[in-house]
Image (cartoon, grey):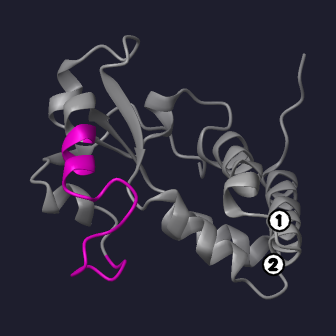
Amino acid sequence: MKQKLSESARLQLIVEAVKYCQKVSLLGMPKTCYTKALREPIYFLWESYGKSKNQAARYCSEASLELSHGNYAVVYDHAIPFKFIQQILLAMISPDEGKVKHALETNVVSCLITKQEDGLLTSMGLRSRMPNHDGGQNCLARYEAAVIKVVPNPGYVSNHV
């Protein structure tokens, strides 16, 4: 039987991923080469640790509630695009568990949306950016700008029980 990692152990692994990405960035490696080295630990060790995507998403669109989650009709979306989370983490001076945990708790918010809603965000230029008027204060600003009705996900299971 696999032993679960403590939150502290998971955060330590993410801190190491942040430090690695900071180092290779300074050495000139393009973002496209190291983004996954940060995205994957955050997703698997923080967002979805021990949970399905349906349980990991804090929000969902009303339209996604009507769909089956196994047929690619529902998309797992970061409410604040991952590139912003990456920028915050890579800009940290001396990343540690506390700083990384705060950044993750504040900025890693996911939402289940339909494939059509995902296409709408893309067509509006909001696939990987926040609306200009927001300034990062409202994690649901992309959905509001696209007039996508978002509600708390009834299947959400918090990491912090």
Residue 127: within the magenta?
yes
Residue drawn at 60 percent across, 64 percent down: 104
Question: Could you say where residue 123 lies in the image, as x and y percent from the top left?
Answer: 20, 49
Q: Based on the displayed image, in which of its 4 quarters is residue 111 positioned?
A: top left
Residue 149 in the image: above or below residue 24? above
Residue type indicated by callout 2: Pro
Span shown in magenta: 118-137
Q: Which mark is residue 63?
A: none
* Tag 1 and tag 2, C-beta contact below 8 Å: yes
Left or right, 156 with respect to 27, comes to: left
Of the pair 52 and 40, the residue shown nearer to us = 40
Left or right, 50 with respect to 108, comes to: right
Question: Could you say where residue 136 lies in the image, as x and y percent from the top left?
Answer: 37, 77
Residue 144: within the magenta?
no
Question: Could you say where residue 116 lies in the image, as x and y percent from the top left?
Answer: 20, 32
> Which element is circle 1 on?
helix
Q: Which residue lies under the disc numbered 1?
A: 15
Reading the chain from its start, which is encountered first: label 1 or label 2? 1
Residue drawn at 86 percent across, 70 percent down: 19
Question: Could you say where residue 40 lies in the image, as x and y percent from the top left?
Answer: 70, 44
Q: Which mark is residue 95?
A: 2
Q: CA distance from mark 1 to mark 2?
A: 6 Å
State whether the magenta stretch is mostly helix, strand or loop.
loop
Q: Based on the displayed image, in which of its 4 quarters is residue 54 positioned?
A: top left
Of the pair 92 and 150, the residue shown nearer to us = 92
> Which element is circle 2 on?
loop
Residue type indicated by callout 1: Val
Quick check: can you spot residue 146? yes
Quick check: can you spot residue 38? no
Crowding at label 1, few (<14), some or many (≥20) Cα neighbours within 10 Å? many
Residue drawn at 90 percent across, 16 percent down: 1
